[in-house]
Image: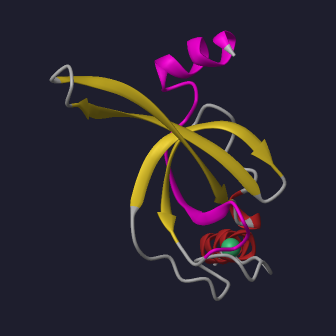
Amino acid sequence: MKKNEKIEKVKNVKIAEAVCADKDCHKHGNLKARGRIFEGKVIRKFHKRIVIEFERMIYVRKYERYAKSRTKLHARLPVCMEKEINLGDLIKIQECRPLSKIIHFVVIKKIKNAEDVKWARNYLIEC
Ligand SMILES: [Zn+2]
């Protein structure tokens, strides 16, 4: 009996954490995530919004070589994920309808912690 009670308590806690009243949450609200998916590191964190950055290679025709280019994207951070995601984390975002002038992506999941990503620390010191 005691074991069952414990399990029930754990389940209740999980449910309480998972549900949020944010209507712009792809899990609990009515925001639909569709379209392109990008991965990147978190470089800024605001209330309900984060900025991620990632590198990509662009072909330069004149020199017949590739150049590195950094892309910054703003993404909506649902209230239920606000504590989970911190600066330097590697996360995945997916395109959604435009939520504001600069936000048309939503955070879908966290891939790695900042401590697990070696470059994150060096990068944050550089800035
Ligand atoms: Zn939520």
Q: Answer above or below: position of 97 versus 67.
A: below
Q: Quadrant of ligand 1?
A: bottom right
Above or below residue 40? Residue 116 is above
Residue found 61% across the figure and 72% down from its top: 7
- Kindly indicate the quadrant of the structure image that contains residue 48: bottom right
Q: Is residue 121 above or below residue 31?
A: above
Furthest residue toward right: 47
Asked if the stretch drawn in magenta spans residue 115, the answer is yes
Q: In this rendering, would 11 be left or right of 91?
A: right
User: For residue 72, what is the image quadrant?
Assistant: top right
Q: Residue at x 42, y 52 (%)?
A: 38
Q: Residue at x 15, y 23 (%)?
A: 64
Apparent side of residue 27 relative to residue 5 in the rendered image (left or right): left
The image position of residue 105, as x and y in percent, is: 57, 64
Identify which residue, 4 or 46, lies in the foreground. Answer: 46
Horizontal relation, residue 67 to residue 119: left or right: left
Front residue of 40 and 103: 103
Q: Which quadrant would residue 45 be assigned to in this image?
A: top right
Check the picture and name the quadrant holding the C terminus.
Answer: top right
Residue 25 is situated, as x and y percent measured from the top left of the image, at: 66, 75
Residue 86 screen position, x and y as percent: 69, 39
Q: Which residues are magenta?
A: 98-126
- Residue 54 within the segment the image draws in magenta: no
Q: Residue at position x 76%, y 76% from top? A: 20
Spot the residue most to the bottom. 30
Residue nearest the observer in this picture, 21 or 23: 23
Label tally: 0
Identify the residue at the far left of this view: 64
Q: How is the image coloured?
A: secondary structure
User: Would residue 61 be found to the left or right of residue 106 on screen?
Assistant: left
The N terminus - image quarter: bottom right
Vertical order, 93 against 42 (above or below)? below
